[in-house]
Image (cartoon, grey):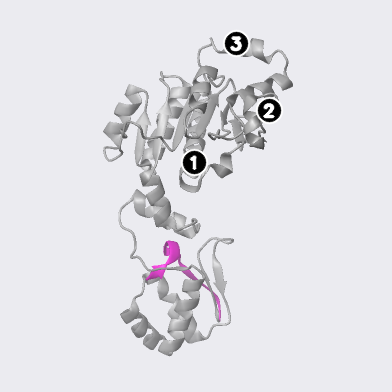
Amino acid sequence: MRLRGASPVLWRGPGECQIGAEAGNAIVLTGMSAAEQRLIDRLDEGIDRVSLSRSARLAGLPLRRAHELVGRLREAGMLHEEPFPVGGREADDLLYWERLRSPGGASARARRLGEARLAVLGRFDDGAPGLIAREATALLAEAGVGTVLAEDPALDAAVAQSFPTTARRAPLRAVPDLMLTVEPHLIDPIRARSLARADAPHLPVVVREVSVRVGPLLEPGRALCAACLDLHERDADPRWPVVATQERGLPAPRIERLLAHQASGLVARTVLEALADGPGTWAGRSLEISGAEPLGLERQWLPHPECACAALESE
């Protein structure tokens, strides 16, 4: 038995201690006797039934009261029965998500990621879209995504070399849990129509001249598709279709390297949220980052009334 996330026990004053180092995520216990406080101070070392009895005796606390305190902490979700996780990245991630009180538990979250299949679609060169796709894929494999299906042979080979335990194949008719595209200037309408018929969510990432837009997440069988996004762009600029046709023939934009690295992290975080917690957070939501807006501009997208997919909303 141990404290959630290996959180430290901090002394705040007589009869008062804090479990956790960060305000807003820590809990504060008050009104304790000196003996109770001495017992709590020992919990960050881990404790079992035998050591609880010994710790209570050393603290001068009746064993019944020690069990009551431990029960209160367990009810508050501050205790874990599992031993301390071992290993490097995996242990760090588990302890971190324990502190954040991941829905269902940090171990369940890790299992969901380990069982997830991610498809990274497209062929990439050395431009910004390729850099973002490669970095995001590496971050996702490191974070524990169990299967990465890369369409690009070079990206597939990079995953095989750097993450040999990550699966790179799936059964023939298996449907990925998420499809990721990273494209220059615009979402490819032909590919988007094909992906809309697949039974998997699609996260489009668009690398533009001065910004990178991540999202919105497009879900199968739900109103809001890539055509909706194009129609909204047309509403904002009637000449947009003419300009977009020309942009499809342009080479990938050359963007600041730091922006590309930042976008890679944002893409990885977005994919992890969708795979571990479901698509809800990013459904209909995009974030555009740039040198001028490093914290990102958030936008909510609605189905376009002229798009045929809007009929799905009324079904």
Which mark is first along the chain, 1 or 3?
3
Give yes or no for residue 6 being in the magenta stretch. Answer: yes
Instruction: State the image coordinates of residue 23 (x, y, percent, origin top left).
Output: 58, 62
Estimate the spatial distance between the alpha carbons at disc 3 and disc 1, rounded to whole Å. 31 Å
Query: Which residue was labeled with disc 3?
Result: 245
Label 2 Cα crowd, 10 Å radius (few <14 / some 14-19 / many 20+): some
Q: Residue at x 34, y 76 (%)?
A: 48
Q: With respect to residue 43, does 266 lie above or below?
A: above
Mark sitting on residue 304? 2
Callout in the foreground (1, 2): 2
Instruction: State the image coordinates of residue 32 (x, y, percent, origin top left).
Output: 54, 83
Mark sitting on residue 269? 1
Q: Amino acid at mark 3?
A: Thr
Label 1 Cα crowd, 10 Å radius (few <14 / some 14-19 / many 20+): some
The range drawn in magenta is: 1-14
Instruction: State the image coordinates of residue 18 (x, y, percent, origin top left).
Output: 53, 70
